[in-house]
Image (cartoon, grey):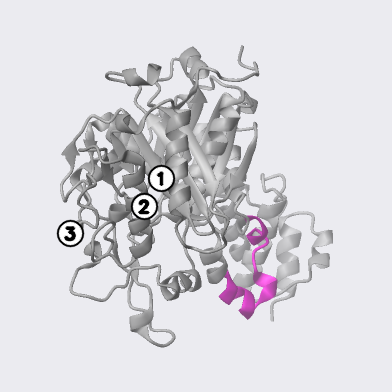
Amino acid sequence: MTTRSGVAPDGVVVTGLGVVCPTGADVDGFAAALRAGVSGIGLRPATVDGEAPGMRPRLVADLRGFDLPGRLAGLPQLPETTRRAAARVAGRSPLAIQAGVAAAVESWLAAGLHRAELPGERVGIVVAGHNLTGALAERARAGYQASPAHLPGRFALWYLDTDHVGSISQILGITGEGYTVGGASASGNVAIINAARLVAGGELDACLVVGALTALSAMEAQAFHNLGAMAGAAGADGPQQRCRPFDTRREGFVPGEAAGCLVLESAGSAARRGAEPLARVAGYAARLAGTSLPEPDLRGEVGVMTEALRRAELIPAEVDYVNAHGTGSPLGDDVEAAALRAVFGPDRPGPWINSTKALIGHCLCAAGVVEAIAAVVQMRGGFVHANPNLDESIAPDLRLVGRRAEPAEVRVAVSNGFGFGGFNTSVVLTSTTGRGRPSAARR
Amino acid sequence: MAALRRRVLEVLPDLDPAQVTDGSSLKELGANSVDRADVVTMTMDDLGISVPVREFHDVRDIGSLARLLRGHLG
Protein backbone atom coordinates (compact mmCIF):
# COMPACT_ATOMS: atom_id res chain seq x y z
CA MET A 1 0.00 0.00 0.00
CA THR A 2 2.52 2.54 1.13
CA THR A 3 5.13 1.54 -1.42
CA ARG A 4 2.79 1.75 -4.38
CA SER A 5 3.91 3.70 -7.40
CA GLY A 6 2.14 5.17 -10.36
CA VAL A 7 0.51 8.47 -11.10
CA ALA A 8 -1.74 10.40 -8.75
CA PRO A 9 -4.75 11.11 -10.96
CA ASP A 10 -6.67 12.49 -8.01
CA GLY A 11 -4.34 15.43 -7.77
CA VAL A 12 -1.84 17.09 -5.50
CA VAL A 13 -2.82 18.76 -2.26
CA VAL A 14 -1.10 20.78 0.45
CA THR A 15 -1.15 18.97 3.79
CA GLY A 16 1.30 21.01 5.83
CA LEU A 17 2.65 24.55 6.12
CA GLY A 18 5.61 25.97 8.02
CA VAL A 19 7.20 29.41 8.00
CA VAL A 20 9.76 31.59 9.73
CA CYS A 21 9.51 35.18 8.55
CA PRO A 22 10.13 38.75 9.70
CA THR A 23 6.56 39.15 10.96
CA GLY A 24 5.84 35.65 12.24
CA ALA A 25 7.75 32.88 14.00
CA ASP A 26 5.28 30.29 12.68
CA VAL A 27 2.22 29.97 10.44
CA ASP A 28 -0.23 31.22 13.08
CA GLY A 29 1.97 34.24 13.79
CA PHE A 30 2.36 34.96 10.07
CA ALA A 31 -1.42 34.66 9.55
CA ALA A 32 -2.14 37.14 12.35
CA ALA A 33 0.50 39.55 11.01
CA LEU A 34 -0.92 39.34 7.47
CA ARG A 35 -4.41 40.06 8.75
CA ALA A 36 -3.18 43.02 10.79
CA GLY A 37 -0.92 44.34 8.02
CA VAL A 38 2.21 44.19 10.18
CA SER A 39 5.39 45.20 8.36
CA GLY A 40 8.72 43.53 9.08
CA ILE A 41 10.81 46.08 7.22
CA GLY A 42 13.45 48.09 9.06
CA LEU A 43 16.83 49.72 8.65
CA ARG A 44 20.21 48.13 9.05
CA PRO A 45 22.64 50.25 11.07
CA ALA A 46 24.51 52.74 8.92
CA THR A 47 27.66 51.19 7.54
CA VAL A 48 30.91 52.83 8.49
CA ASP A 49 33.19 50.98 6.10
CA GLY A 50 33.77 52.19 2.58
CA GLU A 51 32.64 55.39 1.00
CA ALA A 52 29.30 57.02 0.22
CA PRO A 53 27.12 55.79 3.09
CA GLY A 54 24.12 57.35 1.34
CA MET A 55 24.66 54.96 -1.56
CA ARG A 56 24.49 51.80 0.56
CA PRO A 57 21.44 49.51 0.78
CA ARG A 58 20.09 49.67 4.32
CA LEU A 59 16.45 48.57 4.09
CA VAL A 60 15.82 44.96 5.07
CA ALA A 61 13.13 42.75 6.56
CA ASP A 62 15.32 40.53 8.68
CA LEU A 63 14.76 37.59 11.01
CA ARG A 64 15.58 39.30 14.25
CA GLY A 65 15.39 37.10 17.32
CA PHE A 66 15.05 33.76 15.57
CA ASP A 67 16.31 30.94 17.79
CA LEU A 68 16.08 27.33 16.58
CA PRO A 69 16.36 25.54 19.96
CA GLY A 70 13.77 27.88 21.48
CA ARG A 71 11.49 27.39 18.52
CA LEU A 72 11.73 23.59 18.70
CA ALA A 73 11.29 23.61 22.48
CA GLY A 74 7.92 25.29 21.92
CA LEU A 75 6.59 22.32 19.94
CA PRO A 76 5.30 19.81 22.52
CA GLN A 77 4.22 17.28 19.87
CA LEU A 78 7.72 17.15 18.37
CA PRO A 79 9.23 13.70 19.02
CA GLU A 80 12.29 13.93 21.27
CA THR A 81 14.38 12.01 18.73
CA THR A 82 13.60 14.64 16.08
CA ARG A 83 14.42 17.48 18.46
CA ARG A 84 17.76 15.90 19.29
CA ALA A 85 18.50 15.23 15.63
CA ALA A 86 17.79 18.90 14.82
CA ALA A 87 20.10 20.07 17.60
CA ARG A 88 22.82 17.66 16.51
CA VAL A 89 22.59 18.30 12.76
CA ALA A 90 21.77 22.01 12.67
CA GLY A 91 22.68 23.31 16.13
CA ARG A 92 25.65 25.27 14.79
CA SER A 93 24.44 25.69 11.20
CA PRO A 94 24.07 29.06 9.46
CA LEU A 95 20.83 31.00 9.98
CA ALA A 96 19.44 29.98 6.57
CA ILE A 97 19.70 26.28 7.41
CA GLN A 98 18.27 26.73 10.88
CA ALA A 99 15.30 28.71 9.51
CA GLY A 100 14.73 26.05 6.85
CA VAL A 101 14.79 23.33 9.50
CA ALA A 102 12.28 25.23 11.66
CA ALA A 103 9.88 25.71 8.73
CA ALA A 104 10.27 22.09 7.62
CA VAL A 105 9.66 20.73 11.12
CA GLU A 106 6.53 22.87 11.51
CA SER A 107 5.09 21.67 8.21
CA TRP A 108 6.04 18.06 9.05
CA LEU A 109 4.10 18.21 12.30
CA ALA A 110 1.17 20.02 10.69
CA ALA A 111 0.93 17.29 8.07
CA GLY A 112 1.07 14.61 10.76
CA LEU A 113 4.14 13.03 9.18
CA HIS A 114 5.83 12.68 12.60
CA ARG A 115 3.47 9.77 13.18
CA ALA A 116 5.58 7.82 10.67
CA GLU A 117 2.65 7.06 8.41
CA LEU A 118 4.78 7.15 5.26
CA PRO A 119 8.02 5.24 4.69
CA GLY A 120 11.01 7.54 4.27
CA GLU A 121 11.59 6.54 0.66
CA ARG A 122 8.08 7.71 -0.32
CA VAL A 123 8.84 11.23 0.92
CA GLY A 124 11.09 13.67 -0.93
CA ILE A 125 12.36 17.21 -0.63
CA VAL A 126 12.77 19.97 -3.19
CA VAL A 127 14.59 23.07 -1.98
CA ALA A 128 13.93 26.36 -3.74
CA GLY A 129 17.10 28.33 -4.03
CA HIS A 130 20.61 28.84 -5.30
CA ASN A 131 23.55 31.10 -4.41
CA LEU A 132 22.32 30.99 -0.82
CA THR A 133 25.64 31.16 0.97
CA GLY A 134 27.14 34.48 -0.11
CA ALA A 135 26.65 36.09 3.30
CA LEU A 136 28.16 33.03 4.99
CA ALA A 137 31.20 33.16 2.70
CA GLU A 138 31.59 36.87 3.35
CA ARG A 139 31.71 36.27 7.11
CA ALA A 140 34.06 33.29 6.81
CA ARG A 141 36.48 35.14 4.56
CA ALA A 142 37.99 37.36 7.25
CA GLY A 143 38.99 34.34 9.32
CA TYR A 144 40.22 32.50 6.27
CA GLN A 145 42.44 35.38 5.22
CA ALA A 146 43.85 35.71 8.73
CA SER A 147 44.59 32.00 8.97
CA PRO A 148 43.61 29.55 6.22
CA ALA A 149 44.54 26.58 8.45
CA HIS A 150 41.77 27.50 10.90
CA LEU A 151 38.92 27.55 8.40
CA PRO A 152 36.50 24.92 9.74
CA GLY A 153 36.38 21.91 7.44
CA ARG A 154 32.62 21.99 7.89
CA PHE A 155 32.56 25.03 5.61
CA ALA A 156 32.94 22.51 2.75
CA LEU A 157 29.41 21.34 3.63
CA TRP A 158 27.96 24.67 4.73
CA TYR A 159 28.84 26.50 1.54
CA LEU A 160 26.71 24.06 -0.50
CA ASP A 161 23.13 25.14 -1.16
CA THR A 162 22.31 21.44 -0.94
CA ASP A 163 23.12 21.52 2.79
CA HIS A 164 19.40 22.30 3.15
CA VAL A 165 18.54 18.99 1.50
CA GLY A 166 21.04 17.01 3.54
CA SER A 167 20.25 18.59 6.89
CA ILE A 168 16.46 18.46 6.63
CA SER A 169 16.41 14.95 5.19
CA GLN A 170 18.64 13.69 8.01
CA ILE A 171 16.55 15.31 10.74
CA LEU A 172 13.22 14.08 9.34
CA GLY A 173 14.33 10.71 7.96
CA ILE A 174 13.47 11.61 4.37
CA THR A 175 15.02 9.09 1.95
CA GLY A 176 13.06 9.56 -1.29
CA GLU A 177 14.14 11.89 -4.10
CA GLY A 178 15.60 15.28 -3.24
CA TYR A 179 17.48 18.22 -4.74
CA THR A 180 17.64 22.00 -5.05
CA VAL A 181 16.14 23.94 -7.94
CA GLY A 182 16.82 27.48 -9.08
CA GLY A 183 14.93 30.16 -10.93
CA ALA A 184 16.17 33.40 -9.36
CA SER A 185 13.18 35.15 -7.74
CA ALA A 186 10.87 32.54 -9.25
CA SER A 187 12.72 29.69 -7.47
CA GLY A 188 9.85 29.13 -5.02
CA ASN A 189 7.32 28.48 -7.76
CA VAL A 190 9.84 26.42 -9.73
CA ALA A 191 10.24 24.20 -6.66
CA ILE A 192 6.48 23.90 -6.14
CA ILE A 193 6.12 22.87 -9.79
CA ASN A 194 8.92 20.27 -9.52
CA ALA A 195 7.54 18.80 -6.32
CA ALA A 196 4.00 18.69 -7.72
CA ARG A 197 5.33 16.75 -10.70
CA LEU A 198 7.17 14.27 -8.47
CA VAL A 199 3.98 13.65 -6.52
CA ALA A 200 1.63 13.67 -9.51
CA GLY A 201 3.93 11.27 -11.37
CA GLY A 202 3.86 8.80 -8.50
CA GLU A 203 7.57 9.09 -7.67
CA LEU A 204 6.65 10.19 -4.16
CA ASP A 205 3.61 10.17 -1.90
CA ALA A 206 4.65 13.44 -0.29
CA CYS A 207 7.26 16.08 -0.97
CA LEU A 208 8.51 18.94 1.17
CA VAL A 209 9.00 22.17 -0.76
CA VAL A 210 11.43 24.32 1.18
CA GLY A 211 11.82 28.00 0.31
CA ALA A 212 15.39 28.69 1.40
CA LEU A 213 16.14 31.86 3.30
CA THR A 214 18.25 34.05 1.04
CA ALA A 215 20.59 36.22 3.11
CA LEU A 216 22.33 38.49 0.65
CA SER A 217 25.95 39.32 1.31
CA ALA A 218 26.72 43.03 1.57
CA MET A 219 28.34 42.83 -1.86
CA GLU A 220 25.34 41.12 -3.46
CA ALA A 221 22.94 43.63 -1.90
CA GLN A 222 25.10 46.48 -3.17
CA ALA A 223 24.98 45.03 -6.69
CA PHE A 224 21.15 44.96 -6.65
CA HIS A 225 21.23 48.52 -5.28
CA ASN A 226 23.65 49.74 -7.95
CA LEU A 227 21.54 48.05 -10.64
CA GLY A 228 18.68 50.28 -9.50
CA ALA A 229 16.50 47.35 -8.44
CA MET A 230 16.41 48.10 -4.74
CA ALA A 231 14.50 50.79 -2.85
CA GLY A 232 16.68 53.41 -1.19
CA ALA A 233 16.50 54.36 2.45
CA ALA A 234 16.46 58.11 1.83
CA GLY A 235 13.32 60.20 1.91
CA ALA A 236 10.72 61.47 4.30
CA ASP A 237 8.96 58.11 4.74
CA GLY A 238 9.89 55.61 7.42
CA PRO A 239 11.45 52.27 6.43
CA GLN A 240 8.06 50.55 6.50
CA GLN A 241 6.76 52.90 3.83
CA ARG A 242 9.63 52.30 1.41
CA CYS A 243 8.41 49.07 -0.19
CA ARG A 244 5.47 50.22 -2.32
CA PRO A 245 4.27 47.61 -4.82
CA PHE A 246 1.90 49.06 -7.45
CA ASP A 247 2.14 52.57 -5.95
CA THR A 248 3.20 55.51 -8.12
CA ARG A 249 6.07 56.32 -5.71
CA ARG A 250 7.66 52.84 -5.70
CA GLU A 251 11.44 52.67 -6.13
CA GLY A 252 12.37 49.02 -6.02
CA PHE A 253 12.39 45.99 -3.78
CA VAL A 254 13.44 45.55 -0.17
CA PRO A 255 15.14 42.23 0.63
CA GLY A 256 13.39 39.98 3.13
CA GLU A 257 14.65 37.02 5.12
CA ALA A 258 12.23 34.12 5.41
CA ALA A 259 12.08 30.38 5.06
CA GLY A 260 8.91 28.48 4.26
CA CYS A 261 7.86 24.90 3.71
CA LEU A 262 4.86 23.33 2.02
CA VAL A 263 4.08 19.62 2.23
CA LEU A 264 2.66 18.56 -1.14
CA GLU A 265 1.02 15.16 -1.15
CA SER A 266 -1.08 13.06 -3.48
CA ALA A 267 -4.74 13.40 -2.60
CA GLY A 268 -4.89 9.61 -2.29
CA SER A 269 -2.06 9.46 0.24
CA ALA A 270 -3.58 12.30 2.25
CA ALA A 271 -6.95 10.49 2.27
CA ARG A 272 -5.36 7.21 3.38
CA ARG A 273 -3.57 8.96 6.23
CA GLY A 274 -6.59 11.04 7.18
CA ALA A 275 -4.53 14.20 6.66
CA GLU A 276 -6.62 17.29 6.01
CA PRO A 277 -5.94 18.86 2.59
CA LEU A 278 -5.43 22.59 3.16
CA ALA A 279 -5.53 23.49 -0.53
CA ARG A 280 -5.12 21.89 -3.90
CA VAL A 281 -2.32 22.60 -6.39
CA ALA A 282 -4.68 22.86 -9.32
CA GLY A 283 -2.39 24.15 -12.05
CA TYR A 284 0.94 25.68 -12.85
CA ALA A 285 3.04 26.89 -15.73
CA ALA A 286 6.62 28.04 -16.26
CA ARG A 287 8.08 29.76 -19.29
CA LEU A 288 11.35 31.42 -20.11
CA ALA A 289 11.60 34.79 -21.77
CA GLY A 290 14.79 33.74 -23.55
CA THR A 291 16.89 36.47 -21.95
CA SER A 292 19.77 36.83 -19.56
CA LEU A 293 18.55 40.25 -18.44
CA PRO A 294 16.37 41.42 -15.53
CA GLU A 295 13.66 42.92 -17.74
CA PRO A 296 10.13 41.63 -17.15
CA ASP A 297 8.37 39.86 -20.00
CA LEU A 298 4.73 40.77 -20.60
CA ARG A 299 4.10 37.96 -23.05
CA GLY A 300 5.60 35.37 -20.68
CA GLU A 301 3.68 36.66 -17.67
CA VAL A 302 0.38 36.56 -19.54
CA GLY A 303 1.34 33.15 -20.91
CA VAL A 304 2.01 31.47 -17.57
CA MET A 305 -1.11 32.80 -15.86
CA THR A 306 -3.26 31.77 -18.82
CA GLU A 307 -1.66 28.35 -19.12
CA ALA A 308 -1.77 27.61 -15.38
CA LEU A 309 -5.50 28.42 -15.35
CA ARG A 310 -6.11 26.32 -18.45
CA ARG A 311 -4.39 23.33 -16.81
CA ALA A 312 -6.51 23.90 -13.71
CA GLU A 313 -9.60 23.87 -15.96
CA LEU A 314 -10.56 27.30 -14.71
CA ILE A 315 -11.37 30.52 -16.51
CA PRO A 316 -9.93 33.89 -15.42
CA ALA A 317 -13.34 35.05 -14.15
CA GLU A 318 -13.23 32.27 -11.55
CA VAL A 319 -10.08 33.63 -9.92
CA ASP A 320 -10.81 35.31 -6.59
CA TYR A 321 -7.32 36.42 -5.67
CA VAL A 322 -3.86 37.01 -7.13
CA ASN A 323 -0.75 37.05 -4.96
CA ALA A 324 1.27 39.22 -7.31
CA HIS A 325 5.01 38.99 -7.79
CA GLY A 326 4.81 42.77 -7.11
CA THR A 327 8.31 43.58 -5.91
CA GLY A 328 7.80 47.35 -5.96
CA SER A 329 10.10 47.65 -8.96
CA PRO A 330 9.07 50.53 -11.26
CA LEU A 331 9.10 48.53 -14.50
CA GLY A 332 8.27 45.13 -13.00
CA ASP A 333 5.02 46.32 -11.42
CA ASP A 334 3.96 48.16 -14.57
CA VAL A 335 4.43 45.04 -16.67
CA GLU A 336 2.70 42.76 -14.15
CA ALA A 337 -0.24 45.19 -13.98
CA ALA A 338 -0.46 45.07 -17.78
CA ALA A 339 -0.29 41.27 -17.68
CA LEU A 340 -3.05 41.08 -15.06
CA ARG A 341 -5.17 43.41 -17.19
CA ALA A 342 -4.58 41.22 -20.24
CA VAL A 343 -5.44 37.98 -18.42
CA PHE A 344 -8.42 39.14 -16.40
CA GLY A 345 -9.88 41.44 -19.02
CA PRO A 346 -12.14 44.42 -18.60
CA ASP A 347 -14.80 42.68 -16.51
CA ARG A 348 -15.01 44.19 -13.05
CA PRO A 349 -14.48 43.86 -10.18
CA GLY A 350 -11.91 41.18 -11.11
CA PRO A 351 -9.80 39.30 -8.57
CA TRP A 352 -8.38 40.84 -5.42
CA ILE A 353 -4.66 41.56 -5.85
CA ASN A 354 -1.98 42.14 -3.23
CA SER A 355 1.75 41.76 -2.80
CA THR A 356 3.07 40.08 0.34
CA LYS A 357 6.43 41.74 -0.38
CA ALA A 358 5.03 45.06 0.90
CA LEU A 359 4.97 43.46 4.39
CA ILE A 360 7.92 41.06 4.56
CA GLY A 361 10.10 42.28 1.71
CA HIS A 362 11.21 40.23 -1.24
CA CYS A 363 12.30 36.88 0.16
CA LEU A 364 14.08 36.14 -3.15
CA CYS A 365 14.53 32.38 -3.54
CA ALA A 366 11.97 31.68 -0.80
CA ALA A 367 9.41 34.19 -2.08
CA GLY A 368 7.25 31.79 -4.09
CA VAL A 369 6.98 29.31 -1.23
CA VAL A 370 6.28 31.95 1.41
CA GLU A 371 3.71 33.63 -0.85
CA ALA A 372 1.97 30.31 -1.58
CA ILE A 373 1.75 29.88 2.20
CA ALA A 374 0.31 33.41 2.43
CA ALA A 375 -2.25 32.50 -0.25
CA VAL A 376 -3.35 29.35 1.61
CA VAL A 377 -3.50 31.25 4.91
CA GLN A 378 -5.74 33.92 3.35
CA MET A 379 -7.88 31.28 1.62
CA ARG A 380 -8.46 29.51 4.92
CA GLY A 381 -8.76 32.71 6.92
CA GLY A 382 -11.31 34.34 4.61
CA PHE A 383 -9.43 37.55 3.96
CA VAL A 384 -6.99 39.27 1.64
CA HIS A 385 -4.17 41.19 3.26
CA ALA A 386 -3.52 44.90 2.85
CA ASN A 387 -1.21 46.66 0.43
CA PRO A 388 -0.26 49.06 3.24
CA ASN A 389 1.64 51.56 1.11
CA LEU A 390 -0.79 51.79 -1.78
CA ASP A 391 -1.54 55.51 -1.63
CA GLU A 392 -1.87 56.10 -5.36
CA SER A 393 -2.30 52.99 -7.49
CA ILE A 394 -0.58 52.69 -10.85
CA ALA A 395 -3.56 50.61 -11.95
CA PRO A 396 -6.83 51.96 -10.52
CA ASP A 397 -8.71 49.60 -12.84
CA LEU A 398 -7.23 46.57 -11.00
CA ARG A 399 -8.77 45.52 -7.69
CA LEU A 400 -5.69 46.03 -5.55
CA VAL A 401 -6.42 45.65 -1.83
CA GLY A 402 -6.11 49.00 -0.07
CA ARG A 403 -4.38 49.89 3.15
CA ARG A 404 -6.55 47.53 5.20
CA ALA A 405 -7.24 43.82 4.88
CA GLU A 406 -10.61 42.90 3.36
CA PRO A 407 -12.83 39.93 4.15
CA ALA A 408 -12.88 37.73 1.07
CA GLU A 409 -13.92 34.25 0.06
CA VAL A 410 -10.91 32.91 -1.80
CA ARG A 411 -11.60 29.65 -3.60
CA VAL A 412 -9.16 30.15 -6.46
CA ALA A 413 -5.82 31.86 -5.96
CA VAL A 414 -3.06 32.58 -8.46
CA SER A 415 0.49 33.10 -7.16
CA ASN A 416 2.99 34.68 -9.53
CA GLY A 417 6.77 34.46 -9.45
CA PHE A 418 9.08 36.13 -11.94
CA GLY A 419 12.86 36.12 -11.88
CA PHE A 420 15.85 37.86 -13.43
CA GLY A 421 17.01 35.91 -16.44
CA GLY A 422 13.56 35.40 -17.92
CA PHE A 423 11.85 33.11 -15.39
CA ASN A 424 8.06 33.40 -15.55
CA THR A 425 5.96 31.15 -13.32
CA SER A 426 2.42 30.99 -12.06
CA VAL A 427 0.77 28.53 -9.66
CA VAL A 428 -2.99 28.05 -9.13
CA LEU A 429 -4.17 26.98 -5.68
CA THR A 430 -7.78 26.09 -5.00
CA SER A 431 -9.76 25.74 -1.80
CA THR A 432 -10.68 22.37 -0.36
CA THR A 433 -13.32 23.74 1.99
CA GLY A 434 -16.49 25.80 1.75
CA ARG A 435 -18.09 25.59 -1.62
CA GLY A 436 -15.14 23.60 -2.85
CA ARG A 437 -14.13 23.57 -6.44
CA PRO A 438 -15.90 26.23 -8.45
CA SER A 439 -18.79 24.71 -10.39
CA ALA A 440 -17.74 26.27 -13.68
CA ALA A 441 -14.58 24.17 -13.59
CA ARG A 442 -16.67 21.14 -14.51
CA ARG A 443 -17.23 22.22 -18.06
CA MET B 1 42.63 19.95 27.65
CA ALA B 2 40.13 22.52 28.95
CA ALA B 3 39.99 24.20 25.52
CA LEU B 4 39.56 20.84 23.84
CA ARG B 5 36.83 19.75 26.25
CA ARG B 6 34.90 22.98 25.68
CA ARG B 7 34.90 22.48 21.90
CA VAL B 8 34.00 18.77 22.18
CA LEU B 9 30.94 19.69 24.22
CA GLU B 10 30.01 22.44 21.76
CA VAL B 11 30.16 20.05 18.80
CA LEU B 12 28.43 17.22 20.72
CA PRO B 13 25.85 19.12 22.80
CA ASP B 14 24.09 15.99 24.09
CA LEU B 15 27.25 14.60 25.69
CA ASP B 16 27.61 14.17 29.45
CA PRO B 17 30.77 16.20 30.29
CA ALA B 18 31.94 13.34 32.54
CA GLN B 19 32.36 11.16 29.44
CA VAL B 20 35.05 13.44 28.01
CA THR B 21 38.12 11.76 29.53
CA ASP B 22 41.70 11.24 28.38
CA GLY B 23 40.98 7.65 27.49
CA SER B 24 37.82 8.28 25.45
CA SER B 25 37.91 8.71 21.68
CA LEU B 26 35.91 11.29 19.78
CA LYS B 27 34.59 8.57 17.49
CA GLU B 28 33.33 6.51 20.44
CA LEU B 29 31.66 9.62 21.84
CA GLY B 30 29.63 9.88 18.64
CA ALA B 31 31.65 12.42 16.66
CA ASN B 32 31.54 11.86 12.89
CA SER B 33 34.45 12.76 10.60
CA VAL B 34 33.29 16.35 10.13
CA ASP B 35 32.70 16.77 13.87
CA ARG B 36 36.25 15.58 14.58
CA ALA B 37 37.72 17.99 12.03
CA ASP B 38 35.67 20.81 13.59
CA VAL B 39 36.85 20.04 17.12
CA VAL B 40 40.45 20.14 15.95
CA THR B 41 40.31 23.34 13.86
CA MET B 42 38.21 25.19 16.46
CA THR B 43 40.58 24.22 19.27
CA MET B 44 43.65 25.11 17.20
CA ASP B 45 42.05 28.49 16.50
CA ASP B 46 41.40 29.03 20.23
CA LEU B 47 45.01 28.17 21.06
CA GLY B 48 46.48 30.13 18.14
CA ILE B 49 48.33 27.11 16.75
CA SER B 50 48.42 25.20 13.45
CA VAL B 51 49.18 21.51 13.40
CA PRO B 52 49.78 19.75 10.06
CA VAL B 53 47.00 17.26 9.26
CA ARG B 54 49.41 14.27 9.03
CA GLU B 55 50.38 14.65 12.69
CA PHE B 56 46.86 13.60 13.70
CA HIS B 57 47.27 10.13 12.21
CA ASP B 58 48.67 8.75 15.45
CA VAL B 59 45.99 10.26 17.67
CA ARG B 60 44.08 7.46 19.41
CA ASP B 61 42.10 9.21 22.10
CA ILE B 62 41.35 12.61 23.57
CA GLY B 63 44.40 12.41 25.82
CA SER B 64 46.80 11.93 22.91
CA LEU B 65 45.03 14.69 20.96
CA ALA B 66 45.45 17.05 23.89
CA ARG B 67 49.15 16.13 24.18
CA LEU B 68 49.70 16.75 20.46
CA LEU B 69 48.03 20.18 20.61
CA ARG B 70 49.91 21.08 23.82
CA GLY B 71 53.18 20.19 22.11
CA HIS B 72 52.58 22.96 19.58
CA LEU B 73 51.92 25.66 22.18
CA GLY B 74 54.66 28.29 22.37
- Dot 3 falls on which chain? A
Mark nearer the N terminus (3 vs 1): 3
- Dot 2 falls on which chain? A
The amino acid type of the residue labelled 2 equals Glu
Q: Is residue A143 magenta?
A: yes
Residue span colored magenta: A140-157
Residue at the disc numbered 2: A336
The amino acid type of the residue labelled 3 equals Glu
Residue at the disc numbered 1: A416
Residue at the disc numbered 3: A392
Q: Residue at x 57, y 62 (%)?
A: A292
Report if the CB atoms under discs 1 and 2 are less than 8 Å apart. yes
Please indicate whether residue A102 sits to the left or right of residue A161 in the image: left
What mark, if any, has residue A343 been given in the picture?
none
Q: Residue at x 41, y 54 (%)?
A: A363
- Dot 1 falls on which chain? A
Packing grade of label 3 (10 A; few <14, some 14-19, many >=20) is: few
Is A166 or A8 nearer to us in this picture? A8
Q: Residue at x 23, y 63 (%)?
A: A248
Camera-nearest label, 1 or 2: 2
**Disc 3 and disc 1: Cα gap in Å?**
22 Å
Packing grade of label 1 (10 A; few <14, some 14-19, many >=20) is: many
As drawn, A258 above or below B57: above
Please indicate whether residue B7 sits to the left or right of residue B24 in the image: left
Q: Secondary structure at mark 3?
A: loop
The amino acid type of the residue labelled 1 equals Asn
Report if the CB atoms under discs 2 and 3 are less than 8 Å apart. no
In the rendered image, which quarter is residue A168 located in?
Answer: top right
Is A26 or B45 nearer to us in this picture? A26
**Disc 2 and disc 3: Cα gap in Å?**
17 Å
